[in-house]
Amino acid sequence: MSDNRESKLCDIADEISTCQKCKLHKTRTNTVPGSGSFKAEVVFIGEAPGQREDEQGVPFCGQSGKFLDEMLDSINLDREVVFIGNTLKCRPPNNRDPEEGEKQVCRPYLDRQIEIINPKLIVTLGKHATSSMMPGAGGISKSHGKALRRPNGQIYLALYHPAAALHNGSLRNVLMKDFAKIPKILEKIKQENAKVKDKNKKNLKQQKLV
Ligand code: SF4
């Protein structure tokens, strides 16, 4: 069966590269559409590109990206098998917080990427990405480390941002502990999905008998 999801993701990245829907296009060096596998079971979402990301067009490079890579490695994952992106695809000047209007016009790109990848789990990194992806979930200090199924059926896990935890020993420990839950959460999601599949099969058989 042909799978054109990879080319669909490339098409979105091409669209982003020429996007002028908000004023951030005027100050960006490169767009940062996100990177990773179109088959990713886990999608990581940060807030917006920083200086290094803007320079290289790659999400989570620099110190916090290195820390993210280390944590991925600790659970036997790497960038090639997950997808890493941001709620905004261009850097806000001086890393200021994204404006509401910028978030609104940029969000459809991320939503389309998620729809194509159809991940089992979305991990939000930091308070901004968490409030953007999970409105009403509460502050990051309360919501971190808990996997939640949202009304749209998607399962989310909120984590502290690697940049915030990088130079804060206690936050770093909390983040690493939360991160270590990912394999268990994925396993549970797979078990639940298998149960639902089984149930649907049985229902189908019953329907055939009627
Ligand atoms: S931040 Fe998003 S909406 Fe704004 S110019 Fe960049 S890609 Fe377009």
Image (tube, helix red, strand yellow):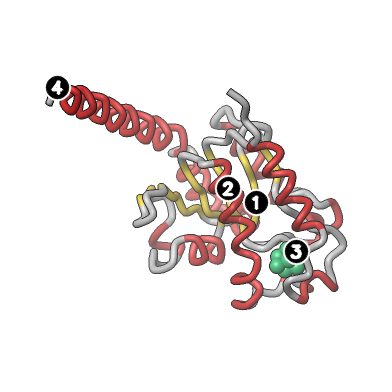
Report the Cα–Cα distance between label 2 and label 1: 6 Å
The first of marks 2 and 1 along the sequence is 2
Residue located 18% across and 28% down the image? 207
Q: In which quarter of the view is residue 53 placed?
A: bottom right
Is 140 left or right of 99, judged from the image as shown? left
Callout 2 amino acid: Phe
Secondary structure state at the residue bearing disc 3: loop
Q: What residue type is labelled 4?
A: Leu
Does label 3 point to a residue whose CB lies under 8 Å from ligand 1?
yes
- Tell whether label 4 touches label 3 (CB within 8 Å): no
Residue at the disc numbered 1? 85
For the residues bearing labels 2 and 1, Cβ distance under 8 angstroms: yes
Would residue 129 be seen by someone viewing this image from the given angle? yes
Looking at the rendered image, the quarter that the N terminus falls into is top right
**Quadrant position of ligand 1:** bottom right
Numbered circle sitting on residue 44? 2
Q: What element carries label 4?
A: helix
Tell me which numbered mark, 4 or 2, is placed earlier along the sequence: 2
Q: Name the residue under label 4.
A: 209
Report if residue 62 is visible in the image. Answer: no
How many other residues sit within 10 Å of disc 2, few (<14), some (14-19) or many (≥20)? many
Estimate the spatial distance between the alpha carbons at disc 4 and disc 2, rounded to whole Å: 44 Å
